[in-house]
Image (cartoon, grey):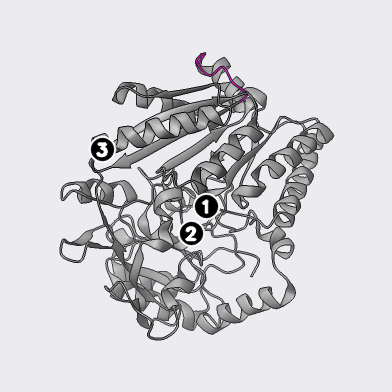
Amino acid sequence: MKKEFKQYFKELLGNDNACFDILHQRAYSYDATKKHYLPDGVLFPRDENDIAKILKFCNENRIIVVPRGAGTGFSGGALAINGGIILSFEKHMNKILEIDLENLVAVVEPGVINFNLQKEAQKYNLFYPPDPASMHFCSLGGNASENAGGMRAVKYGITKDYVMALRAVLPNGEIIRAGKRTIKDVAGYNIAGILIASEGTLAVLSELTLKLLPLPKFKKTAIALFDDIKQAIDSVCKALSEGFNPVCMEFLDFLTIEALKQKFKLNYLIANAALIIEMDNNEEENLNKNLNQMKDFFLQMGAKDFQIAKDEKEACDIWFARRNCSQAITIYGNLKLNEDITVPRSKLAELLEGIEKLALKYNFKIPCFGHIGDGNVHVNVMLEKNDLTQIEQGHKAIEEIFKLTIELGGTLSGEHGIGISKAPFMQLAFNEAEINLMRNIKKAFDPNNILNPFKMGI
């Protein structure tokens, strides 16, 4: 980067907020993909006006800008793959600006950690439902940019369902508002909807207005065990159509269960498939009634066992299994190709059957677990990192899994986004007209292609 460019940023932000040393470059060169791309520098804007000045200068001088949340992403969306500036919000723009108790909304800066908002909302008996697995570390700006989900999605939805309004800075430095602090708003195009899940390629989010809900007073956890994964899936589909409304409904397949038993001695998991269920209610009596009704229903559907946690310790023991799936399956290989495909719930059994055939074809272990209530499956092709032939075959298997997913009416990603990891497969999911439409949207927002370019295959 030119010396005069660095000097401009240092004069604008101060030496502590405009960093071009190798330590900062390395610290911001990777995310959860574990791929490394050195940026030219890292900037820490103090407010929205700083963002506007940075983007205006970068647009005029054709400097690439990559917005970055907390770096917990699995798709490489926050990597500076072509150099340029990393724009990080963790240092200054990390404040909860308002909790509006009358309208039940929170106004936050993009660097606020998801869990910190949840803790603050609980002080007022409110809660923010989207709960990605990385919620203790990930930022709300990153969540909005990736449209993050979580285990509570089956009942409460995902990030897009809670962003009521936002402020953003366009690549030319102009500041826009999108959405309102109102339940109803049909004036103009849904610009907020376009920016959500755009992975930082269209604008830089500077403020979010998020919907909050009253915190349910009671919740309980249960686990159902099955001899057959198809039986478990059929039970879930029928339970939801019968009107059961769980907060979470997670599944573990046979390979995942076996890994948990071997790694963590969870010998209570005597089954070929398991469902972990959480329900909530404002009336404890109603909660117990609903859970007992669900227990009877699942047993009638063929579950071999259905246990309701008696207390918080038993609930934590049950959730330990789900939260440690990723660690457990390392018994099958020291390299994991992890994808978060999603299909309609009715197609889950067909998807898993197809994945099992691919595992036999390639002679891999492919354990699957995830959010059965919303059809989101974490597929894990387990390999040995020193076996280059096996790795090549593993990527072929992933492509076949993507093709199967699309054929079943599914999507390449339910949570992690496209970034660079899945960009090569966008042609499987979208036709030429659809890809061109996305490219034209990108050009309309960012004609000079300075903002997180070459992501999402766009």
**Which of 94/415 is in front?**
415
Predominant secondary structure, magenta span:
loop
Disc 2 is placed on an element classified as helix
Q: Quadrant of residue 172?
A: bottom left
Q: Quadrant of residue 237?
A: top right
Q: Residue at x 61, y 39 (%)?
A: 234
Specify start and end residues of the magenta stretch as a single range. 266-272
Q: Which percent across, then down, holds residue 132? A: 43, 47
How would you rate the neighbour count of disc 3 (Cα within 10 Å): few for under 14, some for 14-19, many for 20 or more?
A: some
Q: Is residue 60 left or right of residue 211?
A: right
Query: Which residue appears at 61% of the width and 20% of the height?
Result: 258
Query: Mark 2 near mark 3, Cβ–Cβ under 8 Å?
Result: no
Callout count: 3
Residue assigned mark 3: 218
Q: Nearer the viewer, mark 1 or mark 2?
A: 1
Position in image of residue 244 (x %, y %): 43, 44
Q: Residues within 10 Å of mark 2 (few under 14, many from 20)?
A: many
Q: Is residue 79 left or right of residue 406?
A: left
Q: Is residue 20 visible?
A: no
Q: Which mark is residue 415?
A: 1
Residue position for label 2: 146
Most foreground residue, 62 or 345:
345
Residue 284 in picture, x, y percent from top left: 24, 35
Which-is-in-front pick, marks 3 and 1?
A: 3
Name which residue type carries label 2.
Glu
Marks 1,2: beta carbons within 8 A: yes
| Picture residue at 67% right of the left edge, 75% below the top | 434
Q: Is residue 392 magenta?
A: no
* Residue 53 pos. (x, y %): 35, 78
Amino acid of disc 3 = Phe
